[in-house]
Image (cartoon, rainbow, N blue to C red):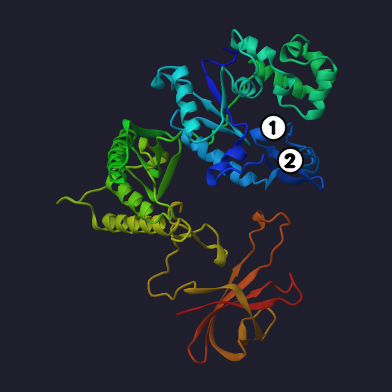
Amino acid sequence: MSKSSGGRRYLALFFPWLPAERLCRAAPPPDAPIVFAEKQRGALRLASVDSHAAALGLAPGMPLADARAQIGDLAVVPHDPVADAAWLDRLAQGCARYTPLVALDAPDGLILDIAGAAHLFGGEAGLVADVEGRMDRLGMTLRSALAGTADAARALARYQALPAPDEAAAVRRLPVAALGLEAEATTALVRAGLKTIGDLSGRPVAAIVARFGAEAANALRRLLGDAPSPLDPRIRPPPIVVERRFAEPLGSSAHAAAVLAELAAEAAVALGERGKGGRHFRATFFRSDGLARSIAIETGQPTRDADLVMRLFAERIDSLRDPIDPGFGFDMIRLAVPRIEALGAGQLRLEGGAANTARGAAAVDELADRLATRLGRGRVRRLRSADTHIPEQAQLALPAVEAPPPTPWTATEPGEPPLRPFHLFDPPQPIEVIAEVPDGPPQRFRWRRTLHAVRRFEGPERIAAEWWRRRDNAGLTRDYYRVEDAQGRRYWLFRHGLYDEKPDPRWYIHGVFA
Protein backbone atom coordinates (compact mmCIF):
# COMPACT_ATOMS: atom_id res chain seq x y z
CA MET A 1 0.00 0.00 0.00
CA SER A 2 1.20 3.50 -0.77
CA LYS A 3 2.49 5.83 1.89
CA SER A 4 -0.32 8.38 1.55
CA SER A 5 -3.24 6.05 0.92
CA GLY A 6 -4.66 6.46 4.42
CA GLY A 7 -6.47 3.11 4.09
CA ARG A 8 -7.97 4.00 0.70
CA ARG A 9 -8.15 1.43 -2.07
CA TYR A 10 -8.70 2.25 -5.71
CA LEU A 11 -9.78 0.11 -8.62
CA ALA A 12 -8.86 1.38 -12.08
CA LEU A 13 -10.72 0.11 -15.16
CA PHE A 14 -9.18 0.53 -18.61
CA PHE A 15 -11.14 -0.20 -21.81
CA PRO A 16 -8.47 -0.34 -24.56
CA TRP A 17 -10.94 -0.80 -27.43
CA LEU A 18 -13.84 1.31 -26.15
CA PRO A 19 -14.80 3.12 -29.42
CA ALA A 20 -14.83 -0.10 -31.47
CA GLU A 21 -16.73 -2.11 -28.86
CA ARG A 22 -19.25 0.71 -28.43
CA LEU A 23 -19.80 0.72 -32.19
CA CYS A 24 -20.22 -3.06 -32.32
CA ARG A 25 -22.98 -2.93 -29.71
CA ALA A 26 -25.19 -0.96 -32.13
CA ALA A 27 -24.44 -2.93 -35.32
CA PRO A 28 -22.75 -6.20 -36.33
CA PRO A 29 -18.98 -5.72 -36.61
CA PRO A 30 -17.45 -5.65 -40.11
CA ASP A 31 -15.02 -8.37 -41.20
CA ALA A 32 -12.28 -5.81 -41.85
CA PRO A 33 -10.20 -4.11 -39.12
CA ILE A 34 -11.89 -0.99 -37.74
CA VAL A 35 -10.11 2.35 -37.45
CA PHE A 36 -11.54 5.69 -36.31
CA ALA A 37 -10.26 8.72 -38.21
CA GLU A 38 -10.35 12.44 -37.49
CA LYS A 39 -8.68 15.51 -38.98
CA GLN A 40 -5.56 16.54 -37.07
CA ARG A 41 -3.26 19.32 -38.23
CA GLY A 42 -4.90 19.36 -41.67
CA ALA A 43 -4.66 15.61 -42.30
CA LEU A 44 -6.77 12.57 -41.49
CA ARG A 45 -5.17 10.53 -38.73
CA LEU A 46 -6.19 7.53 -36.68
CA ALA A 47 -7.81 8.51 -33.38
CA SER A 48 -8.49 4.94 -32.28
CA VAL A 49 -8.29 1.36 -33.58
CA ASP A 50 -9.80 -2.00 -32.69
CA SER A 51 -7.86 -5.03 -31.47
CA HIS A 52 -7.62 -6.52 -34.99
CA ALA A 53 -6.09 -3.35 -36.43
CA ALA A 54 -3.71 -3.01 -33.48
CA ALA A 55 -2.48 -6.58 -34.02
CA LEU A 56 -1.64 -5.63 -37.62
CA GLY A 57 0.53 -2.73 -36.47
CA LEU A 58 -1.86 0.22 -36.70
CA ALA A 59 -1.88 2.73 -33.84
CA PRO A 60 -3.54 6.05 -32.94
CA GLY A 61 -1.77 9.05 -34.45
CA MET A 62 -0.87 7.27 -37.69
CA PRO A 63 -1.91 9.06 -40.92
CA LEU A 64 -4.89 7.37 -42.53
CA ALA A 65 -3.10 7.27 -45.88
CA ASP A 66 -0.23 5.29 -44.32
CA ALA A 67 -2.69 2.90 -42.68
CA ARG A 68 -4.43 2.28 -46.03
CA ALA A 69 -1.07 1.70 -47.71
CA GLN A 70 -0.15 -0.84 -45.03
CA ILE A 71 -3.53 -2.61 -44.96
CA GLY A 72 -5.75 -2.21 -47.98
CA ASP A 73 -8.95 -3.61 -46.48
CA LEU A 74 -9.92 -1.21 -43.65
CA ALA A 75 -13.28 -0.18 -42.20
CA VAL A 76 -12.86 3.56 -41.64
CA VAL A 77 -15.34 5.18 -39.23
CA PRO A 78 -15.45 8.90 -38.28
CA HIS A 79 -14.25 9.40 -34.74
CA ASP A 80 -17.14 10.33 -32.43
CA PRO A 81 -15.72 11.44 -29.05
CA VAL A 82 -19.16 12.61 -27.87
CA ALA A 83 -20.66 9.14 -28.30
CA ASP A 84 -17.60 7.58 -26.64
CA ALA A 85 -17.93 9.93 -23.67
CA ALA A 86 -21.64 9.13 -23.35
CA TRP A 87 -20.93 5.39 -23.34
CA LEU A 88 -18.14 5.82 -20.77
CA ASP A 89 -20.57 7.78 -18.60
CA ARG A 90 -23.10 4.93 -18.84
CA LEU A 91 -20.42 2.49 -17.74
CA ALA A 92 -19.59 4.80 -14.83
CA GLN A 93 -23.25 4.97 -13.88
CA GLY A 94 -23.38 1.17 -13.79
CA CYS A 95 -20.24 1.01 -11.64
CA ALA A 96 -21.97 3.13 -9.01
CA ARG A 97 -23.39 -0.18 -7.72
CA TYR A 98 -19.96 -0.81 -6.18
CA THR A 99 -19.24 2.63 -4.72
CA PRO A 100 -20.65 6.14 -5.07
CA LEU A 101 -17.10 7.43 -5.67
CA VAL A 102 -16.65 6.77 -9.38
CA ALA A 103 -14.40 9.09 -11.40
CA LEU A 104 -14.12 9.36 -15.17
CA ASP A 105 -10.64 8.75 -16.56
CA ALA A 106 -11.47 9.98 -20.04
CA PRO A 107 -11.46 8.93 -22.76
CA ASP A 108 -11.34 5.21 -21.96
CA GLY A 109 -11.12 4.55 -18.25
CA LEU A 110 -12.76 4.73 -14.83
CA ILE A 111 -11.37 4.89 -11.30
CA LEU A 112 -13.38 3.60 -8.32
CA ASP A 113 -12.70 4.32 -4.65
CA ILE A 114 -13.67 0.95 -3.16
CA ALA A 115 -12.64 1.57 0.46
CA GLY A 116 -15.28 -0.02 2.68
CA ALA A 117 -17.16 -1.58 -0.25
CA ALA A 118 -15.17 -4.73 -1.05
CA HIS A 119 -16.65 -6.74 1.84
CA LEU A 120 -20.06 -6.64 0.14
CA PHE A 121 -18.61 -8.87 -2.58
CA GLY A 122 -16.50 -11.16 -0.43
CA GLY A 123 -13.34 -9.07 -0.69
CA GLU A 124 -11.43 -7.24 -3.37
CA ALA A 125 -11.04 -10.35 -5.53
CA GLY A 126 -14.80 -10.93 -5.49
CA LEU A 127 -15.52 -7.30 -6.38
CA VAL A 128 -13.07 -7.36 -9.29
CA ALA A 129 -14.53 -10.65 -10.53
CA ASP A 130 -18.02 -9.15 -10.43
CA VAL A 131 -16.89 -6.10 -12.39
CA GLU A 132 -15.12 -8.23 -14.98
CA GLY A 133 -18.15 -10.51 -15.38
CA ARG A 134 -20.53 -7.62 -15.99
CA MET A 135 -18.19 -5.92 -18.46
CA ASP A 136 -17.74 -9.19 -20.32
CA ARG A 137 -21.52 -9.51 -20.69
CA LEU A 138 -21.53 -6.00 -22.14
CA GLY A 139 -18.91 -7.02 -24.68
CA MET A 140 -16.23 -4.76 -23.18
CA THR A 141 -12.57 -5.77 -23.01
CA LEU A 142 -11.28 -4.75 -19.59
CA ARG A 143 -7.92 -4.35 -17.92
CA SER A 144 -8.10 -3.59 -14.20
CA ALA A 145 -5.73 -2.95 -11.32
CA LEU A 146 -5.93 -2.27 -7.58
CA ALA A 147 -3.66 0.14 -5.72
CA GLY A 148 -3.47 2.43 -2.72
CA THR A 149 -3.58 5.60 -4.81
CA ALA A 150 -5.66 6.57 -7.82
CA ASP A 151 -2.60 7.39 -9.94
CA ALA A 152 -0.93 4.05 -9.18
CA ALA A 153 -4.09 2.09 -9.98
CA ARG A 154 -4.50 3.93 -13.28
CA ALA A 155 -0.88 3.37 -14.27
CA LEU A 156 -0.98 -0.33 -13.41
CA ALA A 157 -4.20 -0.90 -15.36
CA ARG A 158 -2.75 0.72 -18.48
CA TYR A 159 0.95 -0.20 -18.44
CA GLN A 160 1.57 -3.29 -16.28
CA ALA A 161 2.85 -6.13 -18.46
CA LEU A 162 4.05 -8.77 -15.97
CA PRO A 163 2.89 -9.69 -12.44
CA ALA A 164 4.95 -8.48 -9.48
CA PRO A 165 5.29 -9.69 -5.87
CA ASP A 166 3.72 -6.53 -4.46
CA GLU A 167 2.31 -3.17 -5.44
CA ALA A 168 5.50 -1.20 -4.87
CA ALA A 169 7.51 -3.55 -7.10
CA ALA A 170 4.82 -3.44 -9.79
CA VAL A 171 4.86 0.36 -9.84
CA ARG A 172 8.65 0.51 -10.11
CA ARG A 173 8.60 -1.84 -13.10
CA LEU A 174 6.27 0.45 -15.06
CA PRO A 175 7.63 2.42 -18.03
CA VAL A 176 8.05 6.16 -17.60
CA ALA A 177 5.10 6.63 -19.98
CA ALA A 178 2.94 5.73 -16.97
CA LEU A 179 3.66 9.20 -15.56
CA GLY A 180 1.26 10.65 -18.13
CA LEU A 181 3.65 13.40 -19.26
CA GLU A 182 3.78 15.05 -22.67
CA ALA A 183 5.36 12.97 -25.43
CA GLU A 184 8.43 15.22 -25.57
CA ALA A 185 9.07 14.84 -21.83
CA THR A 186 8.65 11.06 -22.00
CA THR A 187 11.07 10.85 -24.94
CA ALA A 188 13.63 12.96 -23.04
CA LEU A 189 13.44 10.59 -20.06
CA VAL A 190 14.00 7.52 -22.24
CA ARG A 191 16.93 9.13 -24.06
CA ALA A 192 18.49 9.89 -20.68
CA GLY A 193 18.40 6.17 -19.88
CA LEU A 194 15.49 6.46 -17.44
CA LYS A 195 13.13 3.87 -18.91
CA THR A 196 11.21 2.73 -15.81
CA ILE A 197 9.71 4.32 -12.74
CA GLY A 198 12.35 2.53 -10.67
CA ASP A 199 15.13 4.15 -12.70
CA LEU A 200 13.61 7.59 -12.18
CA SER A 201 12.82 7.12 -8.47
CA GLY A 202 16.51 6.51 -7.73
CA ARG A 203 17.39 10.04 -8.80
CA PRO A 204 17.25 13.06 -6.44
CA VAL A 205 14.06 15.09 -6.81
CA ALA A 206 16.05 18.30 -7.31
CA ALA A 207 17.89 16.75 -10.25
CA ILE A 208 14.60 15.61 -11.84
CA VAL A 209 13.10 19.07 -11.48
CA ALA A 210 16.17 20.76 -12.89
CA ARG A 211 16.38 18.53 -15.97
CA PHE A 212 12.83 17.41 -16.72
CA GLY A 213 10.63 19.97 -14.95
CA ALA A 214 8.47 20.09 -11.83
CA GLU A 215 5.60 18.21 -13.49
CA ALA A 216 7.74 15.08 -13.88
CA ALA A 217 8.73 15.20 -10.20
CA ASN A 218 5.14 15.78 -9.06
CA ALA A 219 3.81 12.94 -11.21
CA LEU A 220 6.46 10.61 -9.80
CA ARG A 221 5.61 11.54 -6.21
CA ARG A 222 1.89 10.94 -6.80
CA LEU A 223 2.59 7.59 -8.42
CA LEU A 224 4.81 6.44 -5.54
CA GLY A 225 2.35 7.67 -2.91
CA ASP A 226 4.60 10.45 -1.62
CA ALA A 227 2.05 13.14 -2.61
CA PRO A 228 -1.76 13.24 -2.51
CA SER A 229 -3.52 11.61 -5.45
CA PRO A 230 -7.06 12.99 -5.08
CA LEU A 231 -10.04 11.54 -6.90
CA ASP A 232 -12.63 13.78 -8.57
CA PRO A 233 -15.82 11.66 -8.49
CA ARG A 234 -18.37 11.92 -11.26
CA ILE A 235 -21.12 12.55 -8.68
CA ARG A 236 -20.49 13.76 -5.15
CA PRO A 237 -21.77 11.39 -2.47
CA PRO A 238 -25.25 12.54 -1.42
CA PRO A 239 -26.01 13.10 2.27
CA ILE A 240 -28.73 10.44 2.32
CA VAL A 241 -28.68 7.15 0.38
CA VAL A 242 -30.92 4.11 0.79
CA GLU A 243 -30.79 1.02 -1.38
CA ARG A 244 -31.95 -2.57 -1.87
CA ARG A 245 -29.92 -5.44 -3.29
CA PHE A 246 -31.62 -8.57 -4.61
CA ALA A 247 -30.30 -12.11 -4.80
CA GLU A 248 -32.64 -12.71 -7.76
CA PRO A 249 -33.10 -9.82 -10.25
CA LEU A 250 -36.49 -8.12 -10.40
CA GLY A 251 -38.02 -8.47 -13.83
CA SER A 252 -41.18 -6.50 -13.07
CA SER A 253 -41.33 -2.71 -13.28
CA ALA A 254 -44.30 -2.74 -10.91
CA HIS A 255 -42.28 -4.62 -8.29
CA ALA A 256 -39.41 -2.16 -8.76
CA ALA A 257 -41.83 0.75 -8.20
CA ALA A 258 -43.03 -0.87 -4.96
CA VAL A 259 -39.43 -1.19 -3.77
CA LEU A 260 -38.82 2.47 -4.66
CA ALA A 261 -41.83 3.43 -2.51
CA GLU A 262 -40.28 1.56 0.43
CA LEU A 263 -37.00 3.39 -0.12
CA ALA A 264 -38.83 6.73 -0.24
CA ALA A 265 -40.37 5.94 3.16
CA GLU A 266 -36.91 5.08 4.56
CA ALA A 267 -35.46 8.31 3.16
CA ALA A 268 -38.33 10.26 4.75
CA VAL A 269 -37.48 8.75 8.15
CA ALA A 270 -33.79 9.65 7.71
CA LEU A 271 -34.74 13.21 6.73
CA GLY A 272 -37.01 13.50 9.75
CA GLU A 273 -34.22 12.42 12.09
CA ARG A 274 -32.10 15.28 10.75
CA GLY A 275 -34.91 17.83 10.73
CA LYS A 276 -34.43 18.23 7.01
CA GLY A 277 -36.43 17.95 3.82
CA GLY A 278 -35.31 16.89 0.37
CA ARG A 279 -35.27 19.17 -2.68
CA HIS A 280 -33.71 16.69 -5.12
CA PHE A 281 -34.33 12.93 -5.28
CA ARG A 282 -32.53 10.56 -7.65
CA ALA A 283 -33.54 6.93 -8.19
CA THR A 284 -31.10 4.57 -9.93
CA PHE A 285 -32.11 1.16 -11.25
CA PHE A 286 -29.13 -1.16 -11.68
CA ARG A 287 -29.60 -3.93 -14.22
CA SER A 288 -27.99 -7.32 -13.91
CA ASP A 289 -26.10 -6.82 -17.21
CA GLY A 290 -24.06 -4.00 -15.65
CA LEU A 291 -25.93 -0.96 -16.98
CA ALA A 292 -28.01 1.44 -14.90
CA ARG A 293 -30.75 4.00 -15.46
CA SER A 294 -31.32 7.07 -13.28
CA ILE A 295 -34.33 9.35 -13.02
CA ALA A 296 -34.46 12.47 -10.88
CA ILE A 297 -37.11 14.81 -9.54
CA GLU A 298 -36.95 18.20 -7.84
CA THR A 299 -39.31 20.06 -5.55
CA GLY A 300 -39.83 23.77 -5.05
CA GLN A 301 -39.88 23.38 -1.27
CA PRO A 302 -38.10 20.88 0.99
CA THR A 303 -40.23 17.84 1.70
CA ARG A 304 -40.11 14.48 3.41
CA ASP A 305 -43.53 13.36 2.22
CA ALA A 306 -42.92 9.92 0.71
CA ASP A 307 -46.30 9.90 -1.05
CA LEU A 308 -45.54 13.22 -2.73
CA VAL A 309 -42.13 11.96 -3.82
CA MET A 310 -43.68 8.85 -5.37
CA ARG A 311 -46.33 10.90 -7.19
CA LEU A 312 -43.56 13.01 -8.72
CA PHE A 313 -41.60 9.91 -9.70
CA ALA A 314 -44.75 8.52 -11.34
CA GLU A 315 -45.14 11.77 -13.30
CA ARG A 316 -41.49 11.63 -14.33
CA ILE A 317 -41.66 8.00 -15.45
CA ASP A 318 -44.86 8.62 -17.44
CA SER A 319 -43.19 11.51 -19.29
CA LEU A 320 -40.13 9.49 -20.38
CA ARG A 321 -39.78 8.92 -24.09
CA ASP A 322 -37.57 5.91 -23.40
CA PRO A 323 -39.29 3.74 -20.73
CA ILE A 324 -37.20 2.09 -18.04
CA ASP A 325 -36.32 -1.34 -19.42
CA PRO A 326 -35.49 -3.95 -16.77
CA GLY A 327 -33.68 -6.10 -19.36
CA PHE A 328 -32.70 -9.27 -17.52
CA GLY A 329 -33.86 -7.69 -14.28
CA PHE A 330 -32.79 -5.16 -11.65
CA ASP A 331 -30.41 -6.51 -9.03
CA MET A 332 -30.20 -3.24 -7.07
CA ILE A 333 -32.29 -0.09 -6.63
CA ARG A 334 -30.90 3.02 -4.96
CA LEU A 335 -32.58 6.25 -3.86
CA ALA A 336 -30.32 9.22 -3.15
CA VAL A 337 -31.22 12.65 -1.77
CA PRO A 338 -28.40 14.91 -3.03
CA ARG A 339 -29.95 18.19 -1.83
CA ILE A 340 -31.49 18.66 1.58
CA GLU A 341 -32.61 21.77 3.45
CA ALA A 342 -34.00 22.59 6.86
CA LEU A 343 -37.69 21.79 7.25
CA GLY A 344 -39.50 22.98 10.35
CA ALA A 345 -42.75 21.71 11.78
CA GLY A 346 -45.98 23.13 10.34
CA GLN A 347 -48.55 25.02 12.41
CA LEU A 348 -51.82 23.15 13.00
CA ARG A 349 -55.25 24.56 13.76
CA LEU A 350 -56.67 24.06 17.24
CA GLU A 351 -59.44 21.82 15.91
CA GLY A 352 -56.92 19.74 13.93
CA GLY A 353 -55.62 19.80 10.39
CA ALA A 354 -53.36 22.25 8.66
CA ALA A 355 -54.18 25.91 8.47
CA ASN A 356 -56.03 26.96 5.33
CA THR A 357 -53.31 29.29 4.09
CA ALA A 358 -50.56 26.73 4.61
CA ARG A 359 -52.66 24.01 3.02
CA GLY A 360 -53.37 26.22 0.00
CA ALA A 361 -49.71 27.13 -0.41
CA ALA A 362 -48.71 23.47 -0.17
CA ALA A 363 -51.27 22.56 -2.83
CA VAL A 364 -49.89 25.21 -5.18
CA ASP A 365 -46.32 24.02 -4.55
CA GLU A 366 -47.31 20.42 -5.26
CA LEU A 367 -49.07 21.42 -8.48
CA ALA A 368 -46.01 23.38 -9.62
CA ASP A 369 -43.74 20.41 -8.82
CA ARG A 370 -45.93 17.99 -10.77
CA LEU A 371 -46.12 20.27 -13.79
CA ALA A 372 -42.38 20.91 -13.74
CA THR A 373 -41.68 17.19 -13.43
CA ARG A 374 -43.89 16.34 -16.40
CA LEU A 375 -43.21 19.33 -18.67
CA GLY A 376 -39.60 20.14 -17.75
CA ARG A 377 -37.96 22.17 -15.00
CA GLY A 378 -37.68 25.29 -17.19
CA ARG A 379 -41.30 25.25 -18.40
CA VAL A 380 -42.97 26.16 -15.10
CA ARG A 381 -41.80 29.42 -13.53
CA ARG A 382 -42.53 31.59 -10.51
CA LEU A 383 -42.26 35.35 -10.35
CA ARG A 384 -39.97 36.47 -7.55
CA SER A 385 -39.39 40.03 -6.45
CA ALA A 386 -35.83 41.31 -6.58
CA ASP A 387 -34.12 43.85 -4.36
CA THR A 388 -33.70 46.59 -6.98
CA HIS A 389 -35.46 49.82 -7.93
CA ILE A 390 -34.90 49.34 -11.69
CA PRO A 391 -38.45 48.52 -12.86
CA GLU A 392 -37.65 45.85 -15.46
CA GLN A 393 -35.37 44.07 -12.98
CA ALA A 394 -37.76 44.17 -10.01
CA GLN A 395 -39.10 40.70 -10.73
CA LEU A 396 -37.48 37.52 -11.98
CA ALA A 397 -39.09 34.56 -13.69
CA LEU A 398 -37.26 31.54 -12.25
CA PRO A 399 -37.95 27.81 -12.54
CA ALA A 400 -40.47 26.89 -9.87
CA VAL A 401 -38.26 24.12 -8.46
CA GLU A 402 -35.29 26.39 -7.83
CA ALA A 403 -36.82 29.79 -7.05
CA PRO A 404 -35.24 31.30 -3.91
CA PRO A 405 -37.30 32.62 -1.00
CA PRO A 406 -39.12 35.74 -2.22
CA THR A 407 -38.39 39.30 -1.24
CA PRO A 408 -41.62 40.96 -0.02
CA TRP A 409 -43.44 42.88 -2.74
CA THR A 410 -43.87 46.63 -2.23
CA ALA A 411 -47.52 47.20 -1.28
CA THR A 412 -49.54 50.24 -2.39
CA GLU A 413 -51.24 52.38 0.22
CA PRO A 414 -54.99 51.64 0.53
CA GLY A 415 -57.02 53.75 -1.91
CA GLU A 416 -53.96 54.83 -3.89
CA PRO A 417 -53.45 53.93 -7.58
CA PRO A 418 -50.77 51.34 -8.35
CA LEU A 419 -47.21 52.59 -8.50
CA ARG A 420 -46.33 50.29 -11.37
CA PRO A 421 -48.45 49.22 -14.37
CA PHE A 422 -49.59 45.64 -14.69
CA HIS A 423 -48.00 45.35 -18.12
CA LEU A 424 -44.43 46.44 -18.90
CA PHE A 425 -42.98 46.63 -22.39
CA ASP A 426 -39.71 44.78 -22.86
CA PRO A 427 -37.89 46.70 -24.12
CA PRO A 428 -39.54 50.10 -23.52
CA GLN A 429 -40.96 51.57 -26.73
CA PRO A 430 -39.69 54.97 -27.99
CA ILE A 431 -42.17 57.84 -28.27
CA GLU A 432 -42.13 61.49 -29.39
CA VAL A 433 -42.89 63.95 -26.57
CA ILE A 434 -43.62 67.67 -26.40
CA ALA A 435 -42.89 69.24 -23.00
CA GLU A 436 -43.21 72.87 -21.85
CA VAL A 437 -39.71 73.00 -20.34
CA PRO A 438 -36.76 70.70 -20.95
CA ASP A 439 -37.04 68.89 -17.63
CA GLY A 440 -40.82 69.30 -17.36
CA PRO A 441 -43.64 66.78 -17.69
CA PRO A 442 -44.98 65.69 -21.09
CA GLN A 443 -47.84 67.69 -22.61
CA ARG A 444 -48.42 65.56 -25.70
CA PHE A 445 -46.79 62.39 -27.00
CA ARG A 446 -46.99 60.33 -30.17
CA TRP A 447 -46.99 56.56 -29.86
CA ARG A 448 -47.69 54.10 -32.68
CA ARG A 449 -48.56 56.96 -35.03
CA THR A 450 -51.27 58.22 -32.66
CA LEU A 451 -51.07 61.60 -30.91
CA HIS A 452 -52.13 61.63 -27.25
CA ALA A 453 -52.91 64.81 -25.31
CA VAL A 454 -51.96 64.56 -21.64
CA ARG A 455 -54.81 65.68 -19.40
CA ARG A 456 -53.30 64.79 -16.02
CA PHE A 457 -49.90 63.63 -14.84
CA GLU A 458 -48.10 62.65 -11.66
CA GLY A 459 -44.36 62.75 -11.24
CA PRO A 460 -41.56 62.76 -11.76
CA GLU A 461 -40.36 59.65 -9.95
CA ARG A 462 -36.62 59.89 -10.41
CA ILE A 463 -34.71 56.61 -10.64
CA ALA A 464 -30.95 56.82 -10.89
CA ALA A 465 -28.74 54.14 -12.43
CA GLU A 466 -27.22 51.54 -10.10
CA TRP A 467 -23.73 52.96 -10.29
CA TRP A 468 -22.33 50.44 -7.78
CA ARG A 469 -23.07 47.60 -10.23
CA ARG A 470 -21.35 49.28 -13.21
CA ARG A 471 -17.62 49.29 -13.63
CA ASP A 472 -17.63 52.62 -15.46
CA ASN A 473 -19.96 54.24 -12.88
CA ALA A 474 -22.07 55.38 -15.85
CA GLY A 475 -25.79 55.17 -16.57
CA LEU A 476 -28.54 57.69 -17.21
CA THR A 477 -31.17 58.92 -14.78
CA ARG A 478 -34.83 58.18 -15.54
CA ASP A 479 -37.73 60.52 -14.77
CA TYR A 480 -40.99 58.53 -14.70
CA TYR A 481 -44.50 60.06 -15.08
CA ARG A 482 -47.89 58.47 -14.65
CA VAL A 483 -50.07 60.23 -17.23
CA GLU A 484 -53.70 60.13 -18.35
CA ASP A 485 -54.74 61.20 -21.85
CA ALA A 486 -57.98 62.90 -22.94
CA GLN A 487 -59.70 59.51 -23.43
CA GLY A 488 -58.90 58.42 -19.85
CA ARG A 489 -56.17 55.94 -20.78
CA ARG A 490 -53.21 55.81 -18.43
CA TYR A 491 -49.57 55.28 -19.35
CA TRP A 492 -46.19 55.10 -17.70
CA LEU A 493 -43.62 57.26 -19.48
CA PHE A 494 -40.04 58.17 -18.71
CA ARG A 495 -37.33 60.43 -20.02
CA HIS A 496 -34.03 58.59 -20.30
CA GLY A 497 -31.44 61.04 -19.07
CA LEU A 498 -31.33 64.57 -17.72
CA TYR A 499 -30.29 67.45 -19.94
CA ASP A 500 -27.05 67.88 -18.01
CA GLU A 501 -26.32 64.18 -18.63
CA LYS A 502 -27.27 64.05 -22.30
CA PRO A 503 -27.96 66.90 -24.77
CA ASP A 504 -31.02 65.27 -26.34
CA PRO A 505 -32.54 62.64 -24.01
CA ARG A 506 -35.10 60.24 -25.46
CA TRP A 507 -38.59 59.47 -24.16
CA TYR A 508 -40.09 55.99 -23.81
CA ILE A 509 -43.34 54.37 -22.81
CA HIS A 510 -42.61 51.60 -20.34
CA GLY A 511 -46.08 50.29 -19.53
CA VAL A 512 -49.85 50.78 -19.55
CA PHE A 513 -52.18 50.74 -16.57
CA ALA A 514 -55.30 48.58 -16.70
Between residues 82 and 396, which one lies in front from this camera angle?
82
Instruction: Identify whether 148 is placed above or below 91.
Output: above
Tell me the residue that label 2 is attached to.
46
Instruction: Identify whether 262 is placed above or below 407.
Output: above
Q: Is residue 3 left or right of residue 272?
A: right
Q: Element at badge 1?
A: helix
Q: Residue at x 65, y 36 (%)?
A: 50
Between residues 195 and 513, which one lies in front from this camera angle?
195
Q: Amino acid at mark 1?
A: Ala
Labelled disc at residue 54: 1
Across and down, in percent, residue 398 comes to: 49, 58
Q: Is residue 170 left or right of residue 329?
A: right
Q: Disc 1 or 2, which lies upstream in sequence?
A: 2
Mark 2 nearby-residue class (10 Å; few <14, some 14–19, many ≥20): many
Instruction: Identify whether 82 is placed above or below 129.
Output: below
Q: Nearer the viewer, mark 1 or mark 2?
A: 1
Q: Quadrant of the C terminus?
A: bottom left
Across and down, in percent, residue 397 comes to: 49, 61
Between residues 114 and 39, which one lies in front from this camera angle?
39
Q: CA distance from mark 1 to mark 2?
A: 11 Å
Q: Residue at x 32, y 45 (%)?
A: 253
Between residues 215 and 294, which one lies in front from this camera angle?
294
Q: Element at badge 2?
A: strand
Mark 1 nearby-residue class (10 Å; few <14, some 14–19, many ≥20): some
Quarter of the image holding residue 162?
A: top right
Across and down, in percent, residue 145 comes to: 57, 21
Q: Amino acid at mark 2?
A: Leu
Across and down, in percent, residue 404 comes to: 46, 51
Q: Quadrant of the N terminus?
A: top right
Q: Is residue 151 visible?
A: yes
